[in-house]
Image: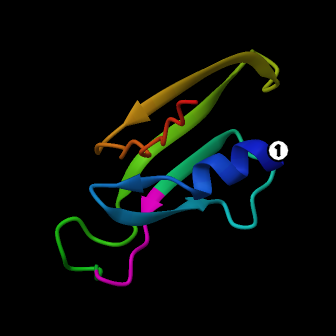
Amino acid sequence: MPGLEDALNALTSNGYQTSIQPQPFSSLTDEIVVVFDDPSLSSTSTPANGTKVLTISLDLDGDGNPSGSYTVTQFYAIDQAMLRLLCR
């Protein structure tokens, strides 16, 4: 899942860097968590490093296998990248 991992690693929230868990990234998990992970934050700041920004949970069937659906829960704003449009 390199494309997904790259996209999630590039996320920022309220101008702060984030990281994804689990690390290393694995397709063997049913939940991916994006947390604050910024040098300007601490474990006691608001927001604090380690605080959830976003979770992606795979929905599982009765046998514990991925059903093909997922749920995204967003706890903090996700910054949008500025796109440069080139007009010719």
Name the residue rendered at 75%, 66% in the picture: 24
Q: Is residue 69 above or below residue 71?
A: above
Residue placed under numbered mark 1 in the picture = 1
* Main secondary structure along the magenta-highlighted residues: loop
At which x and y percent is residue 57?
59, 33
At which x and y percent is residue 16?
34, 65
Q: Quadrant of the C terminus?
A: top right
Magenta residues? 35-40
Q: Amino acid at mark 1?
A: Met
Q: Nearer the viewer, residue 84 or 56?
A: 84
At which x and y percent is residue 29?
74, 46
Label 1 crowd (10 A; few <14 / some 14-19 / many >=20):
few
Name the residue rendered at 44%, 46% in the picture: 81
Q: Quadrant of the N terminus?
A: top right
Horizontal relation, residue 14 to residue 31: left or right? left
In the rendered image, the residue lying farthest to the left is: 46
Name the residue rendered at 71%, 51% in the picture: 5
Q: Nearer the viewer, residue 15 or 68?
A: 15
At which x and y percent is residue 17?
42, 67
Horizontal relation, residue 17 to residue 21: left or right? left
Figure quadrant of residue 64? top right
Name the residue rendered at 43%, 71% in the picture: 37
Figure quadrant of residue 42? bottom left
Horizontal relation, residue 13 to residue 65: left or right? left
Q: Secondary structure at mark 1?
A: loop
- Residue 17 belongs to magenta span: no
- Residue 37 belongs to magenta span: yes
The way the protein has been coloured in the rendering is rainbow
Q: Nearer the viewer, residue 5 or 65?
A: 5
Q: Nearer the viewer, residue 83 or 38?
A: 83
